Image (cartoon, helix red, strand yellow):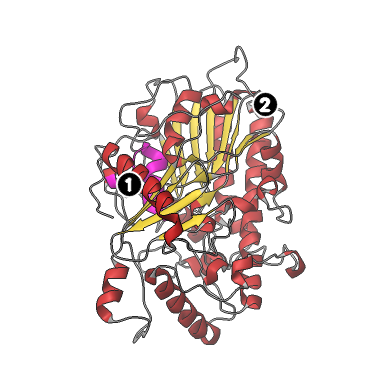
Amino acid sequence: MVSLPAKLRRKPNLIVFLPDQQRADTIACCGGEKVHAPNLNKLASQSVVFSRAYVTHPVCTPSRSSLMTGMWPHTTGCTKNSVALAPRFSVLPQLLEDKDYRAAYMGKWHLGQAGFPQRGFDEWISTEQAGHYSRFLASTGLTPDREDGGFSELAISNLPLERSRPKFLEKHVCEFIEKHRRDPFILIVAFVEPHSPYNGPLNDEHSLDEIDLDLTATLPPAEDVPLRYRLMREWQQAEAVLDRKRLCKLLFFGITPEEYRSIKQRYLGLVTMVDKSIGCILDCLERSGLTEDTVIVHTSDHGDMLGAHHLFGKEVMFEEAVRVPYLVRLPGQRNGTIIRQPVSHIDFVPTLLDLLGQTKPSQCAGKSRVPLIRGEAMAPESVFIEWAPNRTKIKKWTKLAPRRMIKRAVDESTRTVISVDGWKLCLRDKDTNELYNLNDDPLETRNLYARGQYAEVISRCRGETDRWQEATHDSLKV
């Protein structure tokens, strides 16, 4: 049983750590025993860990829109990257009725303009474009390599640790904590890492012997998956061939198991870099005497395939892309617990507000999971995930399919349901459907959709999807 202290000394603070593109299995209790993340592992040992947490949409902007508003991407219109969240949709600090709180956003936003106080955030530190971080680098004597006065991702990835984005955020976060130690506060710390390029000052933190490849990275590529996935795979491998000639190391995609292993080694180095800064921030919280007054949350906007199914990045419905870490440490909590039933990020905002003593706002589509956090029973529910056309680059002169089929596949939308009994059904309007039994086939190696004996399962899961779409006013026909 985990519970909030009977009486806090003050209103609880909230810190949310939000790295970009961190897989669920980078935490020891979720399968990442070899990952060098001592601070996250310590935090997890004192937290409620949702070991099967799913995003609402496996790409940055749509997922972040849900994390900030509690709404589905198809409701806000943030269904692809770089779409600004409309001002009519309130975000976390605006939804909080208690106006005693100071709120700050630090790091990657990806929901429109950033770098200045807005949307209920009193303070803002940007790491995007020619923002605060770029100005910091310029102040150290570095010359921007972008026309807008910013620094490219490649240039940033080659910087030493002391000039890295996590260290930059760490400094500003600690200054905010010390400045507002007497005020209740909400603080979002949105690291860019471990997002690609897979390169950083801790590339050699993990030995290659410590790097385990996903089994599906070593199996022959499956052909009974959506055409869009096969087009992604073909284009990524074509880019890797070019990158072998134009880069000193592969920063985005690979082809061989050895390249997969090297990329994952450097990805985990980025996880460690974020972990180090999280550790310093938690130390600052302790020095300020605020650890026992602060709710600490850690999650990510989506995962990363890292060679699984011979793919990299996100934008697919495989578990490696849609499952993320999700830790919640309550004030005074000492012992950890793992919750294994699936949960969705659609419940993220209602849960955070409940932890701060507020009921769910009407705009939020999900529900508070605080009863689960407190050790109470909540009936398991199916989880839903959506996908809308975003950007699918294809290899020039591809022969994978006729042009008409390729155009349809690139424009496909998906609605996925993960049922309480372990079935995963992915329904598409313009591409191949998928059905996996996650209990028997957690690596999703056998698409069962076309096998006639699963008609009842498909019908049941399709019915759940239909009811969810009706309830959420989702008009897509799948």
Disc nearest the viewer among 1 and 2:
1
Crowd band around label 2 with a 10 angstrom C-alpha radius: few (<14), some (14–19), many (20+): some
Seen as rendered, the residue at the extreme front is 453
Comparing 401 with 21, the one in front is 401
Kindly identify which numbered label has been placed on residue 333: 2
Quarter of the rendering occupied by the N terminus: top right
Mark 1–mark 2 Cα distance, whole angstroms, equals 33 Å
Residue 420 in picture, x, y percent from top left = 50, 41
Sequence-first disc among 1 and 2: 1
For the record, the magenta segment spans: 59-74
Is 352 left or right of 282, judged from the image as shown? left
Whether residue 72 appears in magenta in the rendering, the answer is yes
Q: Position of residue 64 (x, y in %)?
A: 41, 46
Q: Amino acid at mark 2?
A: Gln
**Residue drawn where x is 54% and y is 72% of the image:** 310
Is residue 16 visible in this depiction of the protein? yes
Question: Where is mark 1, residue-wise?
Answer: 73
Q: Give the residue type at disc 1.
A: Pro
Which residue shows up at 68% across the image and 53% down it? Answer: 32
